[in-house]
Image: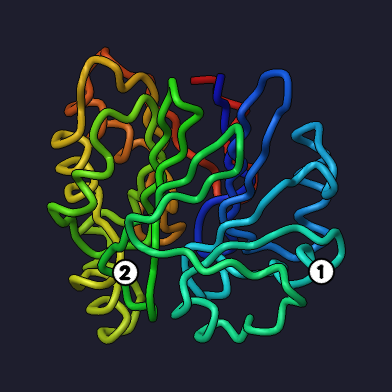
Amino acid sequence: MLRFKSLGSGSTGNATLIEATGLHSKRVLVDCGLGIRQLSARLAEAGLAETDIDAIFITHEHSDHIGCARQLALRHRIPIWMSRGTCEGGGLTDLDGLLHIARDGQAVDLGELELMPFTVPHDAREPLQLTCTDGATKIGLLTDLGHATTHLLGHLANCNALLLECNHDVDLLAQSAYPPFLKKRVAGLYGHLSNTAAAGIARSVAHDGLKVLVAAHLSLQNNRPDLVRQVIADVMGSRAEVVVAHATEGTRWIAV
């Protein structure tokens, strides 16, 4: 069985736990965009310690995703996966033998868990998002991208749970105090997903086996949970539970 939990989601820091339970549980931390004390405290709230993490996967080099990744990996000798572009862009080339290069479409075998990275359009050097499976259940993680591609939609087919970026409401972004260059960046093809764009992705990958959709990476200034719930619920109907990840509290543990 798989379960997952966001430890925080948004510009203040991103980290998501994926756990395969069974005779030999395996846990991967996807992104590590928190300070080490914050991360340790949120892991404790989830019933875990830093030493319970078996692997780290970093999606891209922006600070709200890298955070304390180097410190955590070196402190506990945890192997860490990321693309070569993320490694170079984030200055994480010196990881004392712990670094593994992740590539689009090449599976990462963690024993009880298999990760499948795939490229996405975002303003980073070589961003990768991913799916996770234990062979029976599949979870998709998709944040930090400007638009959908056929490639990423193919990777998200047949997911049983999906953590999906719902960054901004188009009207709230247009009316916000953001400077014009930042509005253009966020709304651009390599920026972040609007609620409408996220709903389009949800519609494309929806099927009877998709039971949980977690709306993630909401902008504190340019979005509201009620707007997200409405637009996603309009697409998913009653077939899937819709959960909105909190910026600092994340989500509860969600079993799939």
Task: Note whether 75 is above or below 154 in the view shown.
Answer: below
The colour style of the image is: rainbow
Q: Nearer the viewer, residue 122 or 11?
A: 122
- Whole-percent x, y for residue 56 in the image: 64, 56
Q: Nearer the viewer, mark 1 or mark 2?
A: 1
Q: Earlier in the sequence, mark 1 or mark 2?
A: 1
The image's mark for residue 74 is: 1
Within-10-Å neighbours for mark 1: few <14, some 14–19, many 20+: some
Q: Residue at x 22, y 79 (%)?
A: 184
In which quarter of the view is residue 156 placed? top left
Q: Residue 238 appears in which quarter of the rendering? A: top left
Residue plotted at (38% across, 40% down): 140
Residue 45 % position (x, y): 79, 36
Amino acid type of the residue tagged 1 in the rendering: Leu
- The amino acid pointed to by label 2 is Ser
Residue at point 38%, 75% (across, down): 126
Q: CA distance from mark 1 to mark 2?
A: 41 Å
Nearer to me, 175 or 243: 243
Say what secondary structure mark 1 lies in. helix
Residue drawn at x 58%, y 38% is 18
Dot 2, crowdedness within 10 Å: few (<14), some or many (≥20)? few
Question: What label sits on residue 192 in the rendered view?
Answer: none
Q: Secondary structure at mark 2?
A: loop
Residue 115 as seen in the image, left or right of residue 27: left
Q: Is residue 115 left or right of residue 92?
A: left
Residue 176: mark: 2
- In the image, taking residue 198 as reference, residue 18 lies left or right, namely right
